[in-house]
Image (cartoon, grey):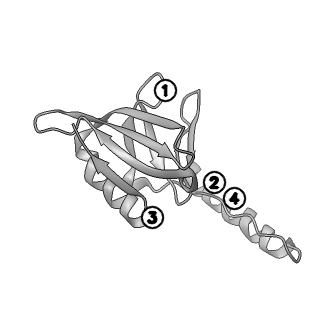
Amino acid sequence: MKLNQRFAAFAKLIEQQSERSVKKGQKAVTLDIPLEDIEFEGCPVKSVVKLRPTPFCIIAISEQPFFIIDLDDIETVHFERVSYGLKNFDMAIIFKDFQTVKRISSIPVEHIEPIKDFLNGIGIIYSEGQ
């Protein structure tokens, strides 16, 4: 807890310093902090990890290979294997180029509503199927 507070203070200091030193035509640095009330577990690559949505992306950086998806690149999300009695579902993320798809499998079903709420809140359309 103390380490988290120190890191948050450090992040705030970086943002403040960036705002002071920004020049005309440039943008200040803003750090992307995970939204912990919507974190969920899933398997984006080889093992089940904790995924954390942020205001700008979805990340899993606790194990390598790291998993980072920019929300601006997402066209739509499709929830697969959503059925009564199943404990897990999968999430297929379709990118705007309609050629790239990333899958996150084995997400516990109790996380589907918070994920849907998050997607609604940022304007990403989703669908659901079996």
Q: Residues within 10 Å of mark 3 (few under 14, many from 20)?
A: few
Q: Residues within 10 Å of mark 1 (few under 14, many from 20)?
A: some
Q: Quadrant of the C terminus?
A: top left
3 and 1 marks in contact (CB < 8 Å): no
Of tags 3 and 2, which is closer to the observer?
Answer: 3
Of tags 3 and 4, which is closer to the observer?
Answer: 3
123 shown above or below 36: below
Question: N-terminal of the two: label 2 or label 1?
Answer: 2
Where is residue 96 shown, x and y percent of the image? 54, 50
Q: Secondary structure at mark 3?
A: helix
Amino acid type, residue under disc 3 in the picture: Ile
Amino acid type, residue under disc 4 in the picture: Phe
The dot on residue 105 is none
Where is residue 40 shown, x and y percent of the image? 37, 43
Q: Which residue is mark 3?
A: 122
2 and 4 marks in contact (CB < 8 Å): yes
1 and 4 marks in contact (CB < 8 Å): no
Q: Which residue is mark 2?
A: 7
Of tags 2 and 1, which is closer to the observer?
Answer: 1
Q: Which residue is mark 1?
A: 45
| Residue drawn at 37 percent across, 37 percent down | 41
3 and 2 marks in contact (CB < 8 Å): no
Q: Which residue is mark 4?
A: 10
Label 2 and label 1: CA atoms lie apart by 28 Å
Label 1 and label 4: CA atoms lie apart by 31 Å
Where is residue 28 shown, x and y percent of the image? 76, 69
Amino acid type, residue under disc 1 in the picture: Val
Of tags 1 and 4, which is closer to the observer?
Answer: 1
Can the viewer see residue 1?
no
Amino acid type, residue under disc 2 in the picture: Phe
Label 3 and label 2: CA atoms lie apart by 27 Å
